[in-house]
Amino acid sequence: MAISIDWGNTNIIAVPQSDLTPVSGVLYDHDTDVFRLQLKALEASVDGIVFTDTHIHNTEVSFSGTTFARTIEILAPYSVKYENTGSAYAVRTTGSNNNILDIASGRLVATPLVSYASTNSAGLIVVESVDQAIIESKIDALIASQDLTNEQKEAEHTTDPVTGRVVLRNLTTLRRWEADAWEDADQTVPYKGDGLESVGMLSEVAWS
């Protein structure tokens, strides 16, 4: 089953779970670049061609060797709704800064048992996948060796591209922690001193 749009009625863009990429446990990624191409195809269809555009897209832009991420804005009167499968799962949007998960503006229709995590960032940039894989694997090894709670160990963890801080987000309990990150000689391993030596090195912050 592919995405669909209830043209001219509810104008809801329905996204089936099968269009998402399983990450781990109940977490799924939604590739927003693929998503906006699917929307363009629906707009060009016989049913959709008479209706207004569903979104605005601004592609990646490079300045001085840095590639900044694309932006995608879902337009009124359209809204996005993820499939209700009857089981709890979490959706994380990837590949752009976007308003897909903006409930307050009406761009997202909340689905029972589905939680959401946006990767929007004022400094979101495109990183080579190999480099990112190396960084993430070393973060995994670092956190696995530390005296963290089970809730923190089970959290999704990455680094903030702007502040360089280690970020832990538990998508089940919706708790988030951050810790200072510094770079060692090869500039790939986030750590402070000898590492995240105890739970006290992490500070809980508001979910985002």
Image (cartoon, rainbow, N blue to C red):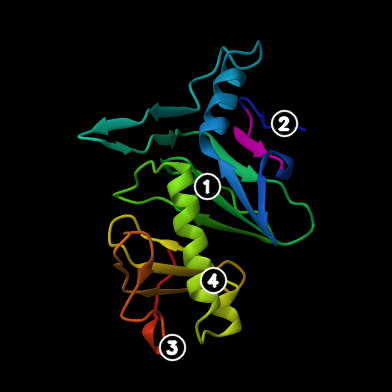
* 24 over 199 or under it: above or below: above
SS for tag 1? strand
User: Which residue is tagged 4?
Assistant: 174
If you read the primary sequence from the N terminus, does the residue marked by circle 3 or circle 2 appear first? 2
Comparing marks 4 and 3, which lies closer to the viewer? 3
Residue 178, horizontal then vertical, whole percent = 38, 73
User: Which residue is tagged 2?
Assistant: 2
Q: Residue at x 42, y 68 (%)?
A: 167
Q: Given the image, on which type of amino acid does mark 3 rest?
A: Ser
Residue 148, horizontal then vertical, whole percent = 52, 84
Q: Given the image, on which type of amino acid does mark 4 rest?
A: Leu
Residue 160, horizontal then vertical, whole percent = 36, 60
- The quarter in which the N terminus is drawn is top right
14 in magenta: yes
Q: Given the image, on which type of amino acid does mark 1 rest?
A: Thr
Q: Is residue 175 visible?
A: no
If you read the primary sequence from the N terminus, does the residue marked by circle 4 or circle 3 appear first? 4
- In space, the residues marked 2 and 4 are separated at their CA atoms by 29 Å
- In space, the residues marked 3 and 2 are separated at their CA atoms by 45 Å
Q: Given the image, on which type of amino acid does mark 2 rest?
A: Ala
- In space, the residues marked 1 and 3 are separated at their CA atoms by 31 Å
Part of the protein shown in magenta: 9-16
- In space, the residues marked 1 and 4 are separated at their CA atoms by 16 Å
User: Which residue is tagged 1?
Assistant: 93
Q: Is residue 186 visible?
A: yes
Residue 200, horizontal then vertical, whole percent = 40, 89
SS for tag 4? loop
Please tell me how crowded label 1 is: few (under 14), some (14-19), or many (20+) other residues with Cα within 10 Å.
many
Q: Which residue is drawn at 56% across and 85% down?
A: 149
